[in-house]
Amino acid sequence: MSQVFHPSANTVAKASLFGVLALLAGALLVSYSYVRSAWATDVDVPVQQPVQFSHEHHVAGLGVDCRYCHTTVETSASANIPPTYTCMSCHSQIWNTSPALQPVRDSLANNTSIEWNRVYNLPDYVYFNHSIHVAKGVGCETCHGRVDQMPLMRKAVSLQMKWCLDCHRAPEQYIRPREHVFDMGYTPAEDQATLGRRLLREYNIQSVALLTSCSTCHH
């Protein structure tokens, strides 16, 4: 009986198998890289706004504290977007005829909110509380980056689960004294590891097991 398959068929079959496995591995690698890339996360992509508010100008140039606009950041889960009258407390006196600020003046005159575009937007199944993080010594720039260097606001980090867990698994590497939470460009006066371990005790920060429990962030 003649041989149905040529001897080279074994080689072709093996090459095909390895080729399929290589393609699957490549597809997984590309997918993994994509979901962590700026294409998917929008990290470092400036977000256009109805009014081109510059954090760089207001924070670095004028020295405006985060809490002047984000008034509830120490007491609420939300850091809140400032109402129009907060803007107009200054801009009724300065730049009060600037065309760039016409939407702000219209908002006040018409008693309507400015429709700002979100920069950070967590899924509904993720719970995040600003006040808890502030009370535990997590600096604004840890999550939001150097806003004092951002003419246009942009994401500084992805806020993907792995990024959050990196901090929750080793909070001593990130926390700072509460009086420096709102400082931009903060550098610790002592070794961060030593400082962090002390603050873990002083601020009664929970164990890593609790910080990384699913129910901590997913209610």
Image (cartoon, grey):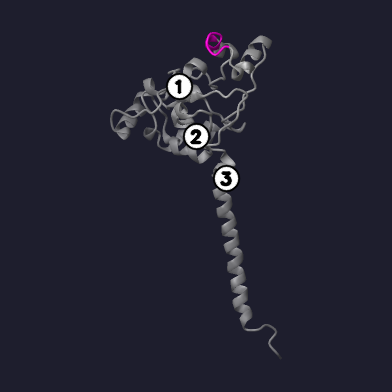
C-alpha distance separating marks 3 and 2: 16 Å
* Front-most of residues 13 and 119: 119
Q: Earlier in the sequence, mark 3 or mark 2?
A: 3
Q: How far apart in space, not on screen, are marks 2 and 1 (Cα)?
A: 16 Å
Q: Quadrant of the C terminus?
A: top right
Is residue 90 magenta-colored?
yes
Query: Which residue in the structure is indicated by mark 2?
Result: 156
Classify mark 3: helix, strand or loop: helix
**Crowding near the residue tagged with mark 3, few <14, some 14–19, many ≥20 C-alpha atoms within 10 Å:** few
Q: Is residue 100 above or below residue 3?
A: above
Taking the image as drawn, is residue 71 in sight? no
For residue 207, side relative to residue 5 (left or right):
left
Q: Is residue 207 magenta?
A: no
Which label's residue is closer to the chain start, 2 or 1? 1
Q: Which mark is residue 35?
A: 3
Contact between marks 1 and 3 (CB within 8 A): the answer is: no
Percent of width and height locating residue 85:
58, 11
Could you tell me which secondary element the residue under label 1 belongs to? helix
Q: Is residue 157 visible?
A: yes
Query: Which contiguous range is marked in magenta?
Result: 89-96
Left/right of residue 169 with respect to residue 112 in the rendered view: left
Residue on which the image places disc 1: 59
Residue 58 appears left or right of 96: left
Q: Compare residues 162 and 38 and report the one nearer the observer.
A: 38
